Image: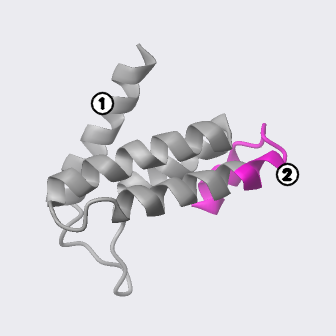
Amino acid sequence: MALLLYGGLVLASLVLQSTLLASITLGGVKADLPLVLVTIFAMYNGPAFGSKFGFGVGLVLDLLVGHMIGLQAFSKMVIGLVAGLGMEKLFRQNWLLPVTAV
């Protein structure tokens, strides 16, 4: 059940990223919704889950784009690991912290 939920969220973020947010920039910066998902899930579930989830999301992104397979997977995996490790040092029940960290 959780796998379906996570897969649906990843798919929804990829669709929103490629359709609605593709042309929107704030100060020359584009939003990266899959990165936001990886960061939030890593902060709530820890570094092991964050690195696995980041690798999966990055691999899906790599397979959809089709060039340099493994680059997004590695970078999202490292980001998930670092976000999960950082959250172990902070107070986890504060809901405002992950929102401001992203």
Kindly identify the amino acid type of the residue bearing the numbered disc 1.
Gly
19 in the magenta segment: no
Crowd band around label 1 with a 10 angstrom C-alpha radius: few (<14), some (14–19), many (20+): few
N-term mark: 1 or 2: 1
Q: Compute the Cα span from label 1 to label 2.
A: 30 Å
Given the current orientation, which residue lies at the most extreme top position? Answer: 1
Q: Secondary structure at mark 1?
A: helix
Q: Nearer the viewer, residue 57 or 41?
A: 57
Name the quadrant of the N terminus: top left
Q: Position of residue 72 (x, y in %)?
A: 36, 61
User: Which stretch appears magenta?
Assistant: 85-102
Residue 61's place in the image compared with 53, above or below, is below
Name which residue lies at 43% across and 48% down.
55
Left or right, residue 75 beside residue 34 = right
88 in the magenta segment: yes
Q: Label 2, on which residue?
A: 89
Q: Label 1, on which residue?
A: 8
Residue 93's place in the image compared with 79, above or below, is above
Name which residue lies at 39% across and 55% down.
73
Answer yes or no: is residue 32 visible. no
